[in-house]
Amino acid sequence: MTSSHRLRRLPALPVAVVAAAVLSAAAGCSPTDAQASVAVPTPPSEEAAYCGALHEELPATVAGLGRSDPEPRSDLTAGWGDGAIVLRCGVPRPPAMTDEKALGAEVGGVGWLTELREGDGPRFTSTYRKTYVEVSMDERFAHDATPLMDLAAAVKKAVPPSV
């Protein structure tokens, strides 16, 4: 994994500010069905070890939704609310991280790249960590980034900073 990230650092923003940014940019998105399965990442072994540690730290609920991991079952993936929130650990570096205009924020002490997806909810990818952690949310969270608060402590504990 390359630890050089070109995503510009922004000051820590309250979750409400991030949610407002997602709200304004995602207005007009149409809903889609929840994910029943996800692609399991294939990180190098060192990164997979961080992901295994993260898997042990993940909460039973996120945003009030119970744990319901996607298929196929893996220590590299987790889910809550039947696909409403899906976490994948050890994903490749997102191309958007090289975009100097990319939206980023710090939520719960973790830096996150924010990608708004047309017809779906946002996707967040951790920044400045030894492996990338991706959190995709469906349209139920198109205007709400607060689930990241429930995940940030686990990411901070299990995946060390890269800088």
Image (cartoon, rainbow, N blue to C red):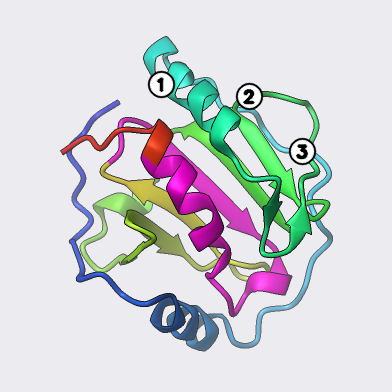
What residue is disc 1 on? Answer: 47
Badge 3 marks a residue whose secondary structure is loop
Which numbered tag is attached to residue 69? 3
Q: What residue type is labelled 1?
A: Glu
| Residue 152 counted in the magenta span | yes
Instruction: Classify residue 99 by image quadrant.
Output: bottom left
Q: What residue type is labelled 3?
A: Asp
On-image quarter of the C terminus: top left
Badge 1 marks a residue whose secondary structure is helix
* C-alpha gap between disc 1 and disc 2: 12 Å
**Which comes before the other along the chain, label 1 or label 2?**
1
| Residue 131 counted in the magenta span | yes
Tell which of 14 and 112 is nearer to you: 14
Percent x, y for residue 144? Answer: 58, 76
Question: Contact (CB < 8 A) between labels 1 and 2?
Answer: no
Badge 2 marks a residue whose secondary structure is loop
Q: Which amino acid does label 2 sit on?
A: Asp
Is residue 115 positioned above or below 162 on the image? below
Q: Can residue 93 be seen in this view?
A: no
Q: Which residue is drawn at the image coordinates 59% and 40% (left, top)?
A: 58
Task: Tell me: 22 left or right of 144.
Answer: left
* Range covered by the magenta-colored residues: 129-156
**Which comes before the other along the chain, label 3 or label 2?**
3
Percent x, y for residue 30? Answer: 74, 78
Which numbered tag is attached to residue 75? 2
* C-alpha gap between disc 1 and disc 3: 20 Å
